[in-house]
Image (spheres, rainbow, N blue to C red):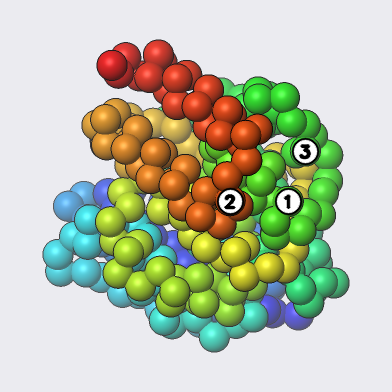
Amino acid sequence: MTSVGVVVPNYNYSRYLAARLSSILAQGDMISKLVFLDDASTDDSMAVATPLLTKFPCEVVIERNTENSNSVFLQWARGLESIDTPFVWIAEADDGAEPGMLNGLTRRLMEDEGSIFAFSDSAGIGPEDEILEENSKCYAAAMGDHVLGSDATLSAHEFMRRCLCPRNLVVSASAVLWRTEALRSALGRLGNEISRWRCAGDWRIYAEAVSAGGRVHYDARPLNKHRRHPGSVTNKIPRPRLFAEVVSMHAVLRQFLGREAVQDERMRLHLEDLRRSWGLQ
């Protein structure tokens, strides 16, 4: 059953496009549409991508910005305009995926009409594809909650409390397969707000999506490959700006979850840890 649309946001990632598009093609006939978005790259991204995209048997849409949008989350929204499939995968251009990732996540969404999205664990890879971390389970459990140690199905409220507070445990947006209407509705409610988030926009979108109720499914296998390199958005943003976005997300979570002494303490400890590790006063 071809039921997945793929959105590939790209900006100056020509060196990773061959491997990335190959990992998407390896997902097989689950994919019925691919939207490649180039955000006014200044490298040879289009020269690399164009012949590779002809290898896809599905419908391919190529959209190029003449000016950089300065927001990957605006690119998400733009790509979604061309998606008419029930499920959508935002496959960041510098990440990777194991064969079968979409098959497993799609099955979970198809079996549960009340699902919002499904996501897998992620391995960490470096600029040259070197393995930095086999999975992200240590990061997920660092504050004492082992909820992502094995496969799980979580109610929207439980997911927000345990996986979005005090930090985002969905370490890579590329690990997520969305029910298309759930993502479209979340972005619609956020409107212009999403353009104000430079780094934590995915965290904000998850919170908005699950605030409407439903369930989230998790596959504990590290089927996604999350690339970490100096050119990533996170590494380009000044630490004070990143810290401010975390503080803003904590305010959003309090609005959705209410004030809880336990959660407030977890937020306080997380902010203290960030101040130390980022050298902030």
Marks 1 and 3, how far apart at CA: 10 Å
Disc number lying in front (3 or 2): 2
Asked if labels 3 and 1 touch by Cβ distance under 8 angstroms, the answer is no
Q: Identify which residue is drawn at 62% across, 70% down.
A: 212
- On screen, 131 above or below 250? above
Residue 23 is at least partly visible in this image:
no
Q: Nearer the viewer, residue 2 or 208?
A: 208
Residue 219, image x, y percentages: 77, 49
The tag on residue 158 is 1
Q: Nearer the viewer, residue 54 or 166?
A: 166
Name the residue carrying label 2. 258
- The quadrant of the rendering that contains the C terminus is top left
Q: Identify which residue is drawn at 62% across, 34% down.
A: 261
Name the residue carrying label 3. 147
SS at mark 2? loop
Q: Nearer the viewer, residue 236 or 140?
A: 140
Residue 130 relative to residue 75: left or right: right
- Amino acid bearing label 1: Glu
- Amino acid bearing label 3: Val
SS at mark 1? helix
Q: Identify which residue is drawn at 47% across, 43% down.
A: 250
SS at mark 3? loop
